[in-house]
Image (cartoon, grey):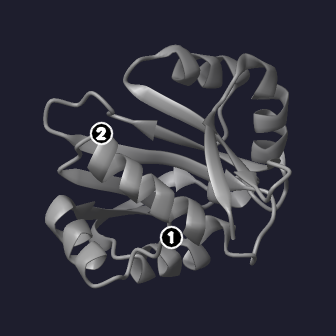
Amino acid sequence: MRVHLRPTMLSDLDYVVSVEQDGSNLPFITPWERTQHEGAIRFPDSRHFIVEVGDGAERAGFVILQGCRNPNRSVELKRIVLGPKGQGIGRACLRQLKKLAFTQLQAHRFWLDVKGLNVRAQELYRDEGFVEEGRLRESVKVLGADGYDSLIVMSMLDREYQARVALGEEGA
């Protein structure tokens, strides 16, 4: 799957908000308001990208990185939201993000949190070399319900990424 990340433009924000509000994505994220996305586009410590697929560069979602100028070199995958599911776009996108974090941004640690209900994403992150660091128990309200969900903190260190590259586990 050919995946390309391009910087999000203000003209993309209607699309970004619509993907975020899609019923298949809402249970797994805490949606932002448009102004928060505008801030992430403009703030030098963040990177906001549109995920494009195929030769026609069709939009398939978006991603946000934070901590890009973190003095501790700890970069956060703040958000990955995709429209199409089950086509390998998430894996291809995640591999590009790891490469970006560890090579261009010189991250020592690339981390994320994922909702406990999002088992599919957890499996992808583990399969892609992320290690569970801990859980923030019942830290987010479940949308449209009375209950709470936990956040699972996962990360990968630069040496772990380099070992995966050396073993050919990061693909082309």
Residue 163 image label: none
Q: Which residue is mark 1?
A: 116
Q: Is 127 placed above or below 142 here? A: below
Q: Tag 2: residue type? A: Leu
| Residue 129 on image: x %, y % | 34, 76
Residue 117 visible to the viewer: no
8 or 13: nearer the viewer: 8
Residue 29 visible to the viewer: yes
Q: Residue at x 28, y 52 (%)?
A: 102
| Residue 52 on image: x %, y % | 73, 49
Q: Is 69 placed above or below 148 here? A: above
Could you tell me if the residues under marks 1 and 2 are in contact, i.e. CB atoms within 8 Å? no
Q: Residue at x 53, y 24 (%)?
A: 40
Tag 2 or tag 1, which sits nearer the N-term?
Answer: 2
3 or 149: nearer the viewer: 3
In the image, 46: left or right of 48?
A: left
Q: Which residue is mark 2?
A: 105
| Residue 47 on image: x %, y % | 48, 32
CA distance separating discs 1 and 2: 28 Å
Q: Is 126 placed above or below 154 here? A: below
Quarter of the rendering occupied by the N terminus? bottom right
Q: Tag 1: residue type? A: Gly
In the image, 8: left or right of 17?
A: left
